[in-house]
Amino acid sequence: MSRATQQPSQSVSGQPEGLIGTSARRPDGRLKVTGEFAYGSDLWMDDMIWGVTLRSPHPYAKIKSVSIGAALATGGVYAVLTAQDVPGDNAYGLEHADQPVLASGVVRYAGEPVALVAADHPEVARRAAGKIVVEYEPLDPVTDPVAALDPAAPRLHPGGNLVRHLKIRKGDPEPAAEVVVTGCYQVGMQDQAFLGPEAGLAVPDGNGGVDLYVSTQWLHVDQKQVCAALGLRPEQVRLTLAGVGGAFGGREDLSMHVHACLLALHTGKPVKMVYSREESFFGHVHRHPALISYEHGAGRDGKLVYVKAVIHLDGGAYASSTSAVVGNAGTMGAGPYVVPSVRIDVYGVYTNNPPCGAMRGFGSVQAAFGYEAQMDKLAAALGLDPVQFRCLNAMEMGSSGPTGQVIDSPAPVAELLRRVERMPLPAAGSGGSGGSAGSGGDLRQLPGGVGNTTHGEGVVRGVGYAVGYKNVGFSEGYDDYSTARVRLENVAGEPVVSVHTAAAEVGQGLVTIEQQICRTELGVGQVVVVPKDTGVGSAGSTSASRQTYVTGGAVKHACELVRERLFTLVRLRLELPGAELVLADNLVWLRTGDDGAGAGPAGLIGDFLGDEVIEETVQWRHRKTWPVDPQTGQGFAHVQYAFAAHRAVVDVDLELGLVKVVALDCAQDVGKALNPQAVVGQIQGGSAQGLGLAVMEEIQVRDGMIKNPSFTDYLIPTILDVPPMRIDVLEYQDPHAPYGVRGVGEPPTISSGPAIVAALRAATGLELNRVPVRPHDITGT
Amino acid sequence: MMEFLRARTWQEALAAKAERRDALPIAGGTDVMVELNFDRRRPAALLDLSPVPELRGWHQADGWLAVGAGVTYAELTGERGQAERRELGRRLRGLAIAARTVGSPQIRNRGTIGGNLGSASPAGDCHPSLLAARAEVEVASVRGSRRIGIDDFFTGVKRSALAPDELIAAVWIRPPSGPEQFAKIGTRNAMVIAVAAFALALDPERGLVGTGIGSAAPTPVRALAAESFLAGAIGDAGLWESRRPLPEPVMSEFAALVSAAARPIDDVRGTAGYRRHALGVLARRTLGWAWRDYCEEAR
Ligand SMILES: Cc1cc2nc3c(=O)[nH]c(=O)nc-3n(C[C@H](O)[C@H](O)[C@H](O)COP(=O)(O)OP(=O)(O)OC[C@H]3O[C@@H](n4cnc5c(N)ncnc54)[C@H](O)[C@@H]3O)c2cc1C
């Protein structure tokens, strides 16, 4: 990895600590490693009571009646609430307020909240919930996202079953090409599978308001929805971030937020709610399953001529962020390639399946399984090497995408592919070596692992490539901003910076980045990250790979304003109105003049500061985007694109259909690695999550019912499933972004899965048009 | 309220179980605690067997090995324990391979063979090897003790022949005189419940073949027709003595008979068709490994 080192402190002291560009330590690292970090599920107040949720067992049913008498009469129960107890709007949602806080009259998915109970013990609350009698009249659920669009299908919402139809039309509407390939692909429902379940504690303030401590991704959008549901003003509903054990998009929507507040306001007591692992599968949205069909045309010269696609995304019972997921699947549905003619239709649909919404990669993941499979098919039809073919058509700076938007910062698509292609391949597998278990080869390196299913028999190797891209930040004209408050003061004689944002730390390390930026901009070593709450303005969501860019930008800008005010103080004191100053290592430095005269330390920051407290609060926005044209999908919709490429090497047991991913190497452009170790961590984690979707992770839904709501049967990769990874981090700075950064978290999740499936196809010769690829898809049995 | 009873000796344990038939025994707790946490079970009392010294070890008698119910997977694999315990894994090869496929290191450190039998799950990973080795389960109560042939132990899905006042004391195994194998399919490479599992034991001294199938029928089962076919084919051709390669048609027929012995279903972990197919593949492969080991022993 190559990084510029221009920090003044490096030239003056040689010992920079925790500045940007270094792998500074996380402030919460020690607590997390030692198990002392308090997650949402650890929240505690001595006089708190417990809330539980009664959920619908039916995917679609009318509610005829709800009888709460027996539940309410249970000893230890404080409250039993139903839809009629919701004082404000009984409807919320990120994009459309279509989801009831508590179901009223109808339930639209299995797991929908119907009633709440608060009791002095969670067990008592659960038993009481079991005594609530709900009389349902089950209806035939709508579970097929294509059939849902049939005018004859039951209308699940007043506006019908279509959430959004995005049309992209570019170039020749009737293109013809010498080589044409088509394919239909299917993506299963993936879960975020965060380890810390939904949890929060609502504390009534005695004046009709409430404080909510909750694990979430966006405090302010929660606050807005909670206020609407409770009929309260924002100053009456204060949110503080509780420790978040992973998010990946699954905490963008409300879960227990309103429920806990309702119970707290009703009982006058602090109410804690924590979902069990099983309930968690019903308590958050999942990744949209997709049905995808593509037609690609190319010339004999290997150049793409056109792409046509139709994508159906099953949004389930409520809209959540379906519209935006549709936006991504469409606007990036042609992949990071130059295609003169594009015709894409994406439909986001309501069904009675579990609600789907945000998950890492957000629409781009689904599309990439389709377009990357197509690229391999086309390469084969043209007799070209898959990497060569991709490079021939790769986007670069100056290319125009399917929306007509010109890529105006580095887009090193071909270089990323070439880099993974050039990485050394892993040593040949143990295929054919034989020998009984333990008597030689390491089973852990073989498909089937310690299950001892092969000693090399049936095992073949395959190599596959994929590249993907995604927008960073909120798109299509969204007013996407963050707020930062930075304060500089002396504490016990030492200068201390405090940085206050509402940006949710969900494990990605934004708290570290905030410290690094403050240290770099203000030259002060001690930086305190103030707890995240709604006491400061919105930071926007911790999603769309955007926080380092947007909240990082806000913190940087606030620091710059604080620094200017400090410089004014210093110049006054030094009586050098024109002095050029630099901050580093707790010192104010006079910048070296051309002749070197007058350069050197001017004094301690703390001494200049004295009793002054310098505080600045700023709102910071990335550059504007615009909605796409509703008829053509053309427009400047995205603020930034991020790219990653993978090469996967797999060993497959052809007879048993078992898979060992042997290597999963990645090259990604991150613009500027503010914290190189955190960047690599994101790439490893993102790649592993893509691997999960490719070969094992799926919420199995039959007739609207989740069949595997547990970690026993919803399998996520273990250490024996995730190979060591070679990671190449490129730093082509984006001139539009603070420090040149480019979002990091999502791109690796997009290309890793398609690369693995490509490798599986190479090994097996099968079409494998559905992910996750299951053993019986390979054996055909 | 749930009572917690702790037995310090085997006699105490039997007395407690006689008095409190509603007490649920708990050994490693890796099944019991999950059931309690998921609220699938609400026993009136727990009877903790983990301190009982009599359950912890193993010994030999009359050519049999008696493995205490409290012996853990880690002790079977030799990951944990004294040299003496690693010896156990060397003598019970099939069980040791099976134990290595169980859960994670944490589960292998806690989970016991007695607990696996107590749960009597069709997916229990000890069971196929115990079936293949024609093991016997020693159970006891204040009324006395008895040995149940492994074939009679599993009576239904998660049901066993254990009487309400009985506890499992030990598993008795006469180590087969030839190689043993075990293979388990899961959809990830560790920490996974078996989609299908197969165990094989060759006993040249007695001219016997043993098999066990897991996760492909309501209970763990033997593939009896496959056993007698293979034992017959080997015996008739004098292959126990000659140690010559097994003829291809014999391998194929054995695999087909193992497949046919399964009564699998479709569920979230796999399809019935895949399970049947996979068992055939495992049967063939494990037989290949075991037979090769048998031939190489002689050299
Ligand atoms: C994460 C995880 C992974 C797992 N992976 C596997 C796996 O790969 N393969 C597998 O087979 N299992 C697996 N299991 C299940 C479990 O670990 C095994 O079944 C284990 O053998 C249970 O042993 P234990 O000592 O923990 O039993 P416990 O949980 O203590 O008891 C299990 C049952 O046996 C009864 N019991 C225990 N001892 C006696 C006795 N002496 N007499 C009478 N009854 C008794 C108990 O009452 C209970 O019904 C897994 C469990 C977990 C939590």
Image (cartoon, rainbow, N blue to C red):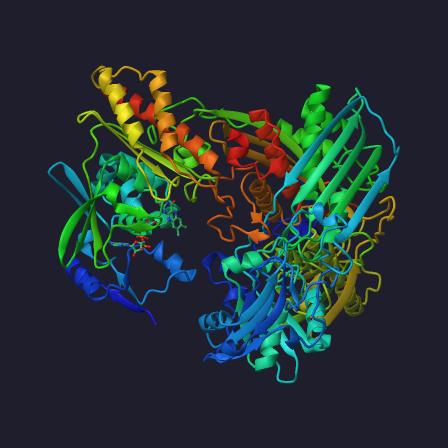
Residue B239: x and y in percent read 24, 17
| Residue found 27% across the figure and 39% down from its top | B130
Q: Is residue B261 left or right of residue A639?
A: left
Return the residue found at the far left: B62
Residue A424 in sight from this viewpoint: no
Return the residue found at the far bottom: A207
Residue B274 in sight from this viewpoint: yes
| Residue found 29% across the figure and 52% down from its top | B118
Residue A662: x and y in percent read 52, 32
Q: Which corner quadrant of the image does residue B65 belong to? A: top left
Query: Between residues A143 and A244, which one lies in front from this camera angle?
Result: A143
| Number of marks | 0
Indicate the quadrant containing the N terminus of chain A: top left, top right, bottom left or bottom right.
Answer: top right
Against A531, is A702 above or below? above
Residue A553: x and y in percent read 74, 56
Residue A655: x and y in percent read 47, 27
Q: Is residue B141 left or right of residue A198?
A: left
Query: Between residues B129 and A202, which one lies in front from this camera angle?
Result: B129
Against A521, is A780 above or below? above
| Residue found 56% across the figure and 47% down from its top | A700
